[in-house]
Amino acid sequence: MDTSIFIHDKAIVEPGASLGPKTRVWAFAHVLPGARIGADCNICDHCFIEGTVVLGDRVTVKCGVQLWDGVVLEDDVFVGPNVAFANDPFPRSKQRPEKYAKTRVRQGASIGSNATILPGIVIGRNAMVGAGAVVTKDVPANAIVVGNPAYIKGYDLADRGAAAPVETSAVSLPVDELGIPGVRLCELPLVKDLRGSLSFGEIGRHLPFTPKRYFVVFDVPNQKVRGEHAHKRLHQFLICLKGRCRVLLDDGQRRAQTLLESPQAGLHIPPMVWAAQFDYTPETVLLVLASDTYSAEDYIRDYDDFLAAVKSGMR
């Protein structure tokens, strides 16, 4: 055995389990045959790891965690104390399913103490699950989720040199303030008189493209998220006509977050920018103007596919 591997004398690592260099397994942990644990991992006291579990490199599993068949933790994942994973959606005593549900925690994600992860869930790259959250659906990359059932509270902006969150008002902000090249927050004119208020936009002056399609998003429950994709060629222009919502923006190198809460603010999202809208108020009405008609082929809906496209130079 690699002498850099540490196994506490009160831990059980069964023959047939695989441990990478510099991995540490502490007291009263039990690793079954077939489990694969990468390099420089830290398996703390009273953990149990079944035989088809796979851990990447530099994974930390804190005390009291059970990892059941079907669980995969990618590189640099952190699992807090007493996190509960499940792998059978309808468990019955002595009735095993033919195949256990696959649960994957993607690279760099963290799960807070006492969270519960239902079977078949994917927790996205760099996501953060808050302590005590009950995760019933997939968590997007970089999302911060809390609650029971878990909902998106925000997005992690600290990674990869991201800009600080920007809270918009009805004032123009230069591109640099959002930190995402090509993204522009535009001030739209506002006219008020005794008859009410009117806001408008003109092609060329405010809108950088001629719209060929529009759609309206409304009646979105507060805990739901819209968007979560990028476009290969399509430009979009977002105006919050009523209420408010927040928008995550990500170009694969930088991330920013902005608040839309006035018809005076228009947000231009160019191609190859990952965007998601969340934190809707019940009365929110969001107008989206698009530079072309709908094409399913123009969408990039998987965040890892988006990062790969950015890396390949697709712009």
Image: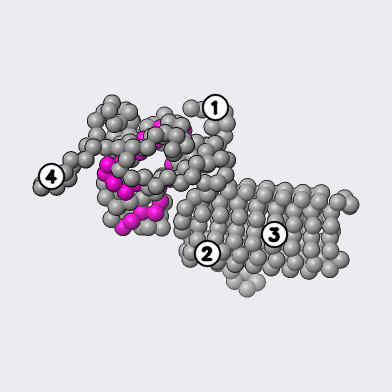
Picture layout, residue 37 above or below residue 171: below
Q: Which one is earlier in the sequence, the residue at label 4 or at label 1?
A: 4
**Would you identify the image quadrant in which residue 83 lies?**
bottom right
Q: Secondary structure at mark 1?
A: loop
Q: Nearer the viewer, residue 138 or 42?
A: 42
Q: Which one is earlier in the sequence, the residue at label 3 or at label 4?
A: 3
The percent coordinates of residue 305 (x first, y second) are 54, 37
**Would you identify the image quadrant in which residue 30 lies?**
bottom right
Disc 3 residue type (three-letter):
Val
CA gap between label 1 and label 2 equals: 38 Å
- Estimate how packed mark 3 is, as few (under 14), some (14 to 19) or many (20 or more) residues with alpha carbons within 10 Å: many
Q: Nearer the viewer, residue 270 or 139?
A: 270
Q: Secondary structure at mark 2?
A: strand
- The residue that label 4 is drawn on is 193
Farthest left residue in view? 194
Q: Secondary structure at mark 3?
A: strand
Q: Could you tell me which residue is drawn at 32 percent across and 48 percent down?
A: 261
Disc 1 residue type (three-letter):
Gly
- The residue that label 2 is drawn on is 134
Q: Could you tell me which residue is drawn at 65 percent across and 65 percent down?
A: 81
The disc label shown at residue 313, or none: 1
Disc 2 residue type (three-letter):
Val
The answer to whether mark 4 and mark 1 are in CB contact below 8 A is no
Farthest bottom residue in view? 93
